[in-house]
Amino acid sequence: MGLTTVLAACGTDDTHAATHDVGAASVSSSADEGPYAGRELPEPKARPAFTLTDQTGATYDFAAATAGQPTMLFFGYANCPDVCPTTMADVALALRSVPEDVAARTQVVFVTTDPARDTADFLGSYLARFDAGLPNRFIGLTGTQAAVEAAQEAAEVPLAEGNGTMHATSLYLFGTDDLARVMFSAGDTSAEIAQDLEVVANA
């Protein structure tokens, strides 16, 4: 039985109670069904094409900037008190545990679902809490509300609701072939992310 991508309301007393089915593509419910520790997608997802503004204020073309590189893509917001910082911390731990050459080739991209509050400078300060000492700094992306929604649509994740505070919690891992075959969500560990990152990076 597959799982379904959900929107999670961050910061609630019961995150599970705040999630709801949004009818997105189901994924494998067990790592035993495939080669990954994370959740294997039933069909590979192509690296999406969208353009936003990074934390330096520069234009960032996601597909072009990350092409051919292992890439983790997550949609969230900097004021989130639980799911988002936990996910970024797990990603950072995973990158610190893999071989240095793998970490050096891996891109991590955090796209805000709350562009009204998440300015480029604010995203830069937020992500600096997690990526210190890593060979690649995390990329934070923001833009107009329309541009952020277009990015979510390009990535085939449900549009965030509640001013961006209810958003998909999926962390997608794209490989060197520009396809994502595995994703992670709340509850998956840094060790599981690291394991699959090495598989994808060395494929």
Image (cartoon, helix red, strand yellow):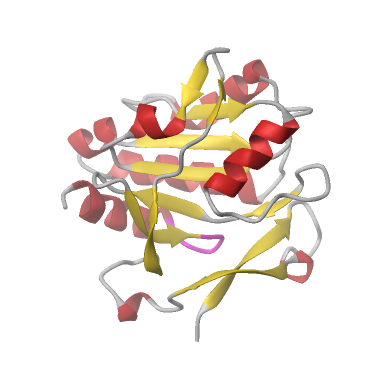
Front one among 139 and 100: 139
Residue at the image point whose x is 59% and y is 54% from the top:
157
In the rendered image, residue 200, in percent from the top left (x then y), is placed at 25, 52
Front one among 25 and 171: 25
- Answer whether residue 85 is visible to the viewer in this image: no
Left or right position of 173 against 10: left
Front one among 117 and 160: 160
In the rendered image, residue 69, in percent from the top left (x then y), is placed at 28, 37
- Answer whether residue 137 is visible to the viewer in this image: yes
Residue at the image point whose x is 26% and y is 30% from the top:
104
From this view, report whether residue 193 is shown above or below residue 104.
below
From this view, report whether residue 122 is shown above or below residue 6.
above
In the rendered image, residue 37, in percent from the top left (x then y), is placed at 34, 67
From this view, report whether residue 178 is shown above or below residue 64.
below
Left or right position of 197 against 149: left
Asked whether residue 191 is drawn in magenta, I would say no
Q: Quadrant of residue 76?
A: top right
Residue at the image point whose x is 30% and y is 57% from the top:
196
| The residue stretch that appears in magenta | 185-189
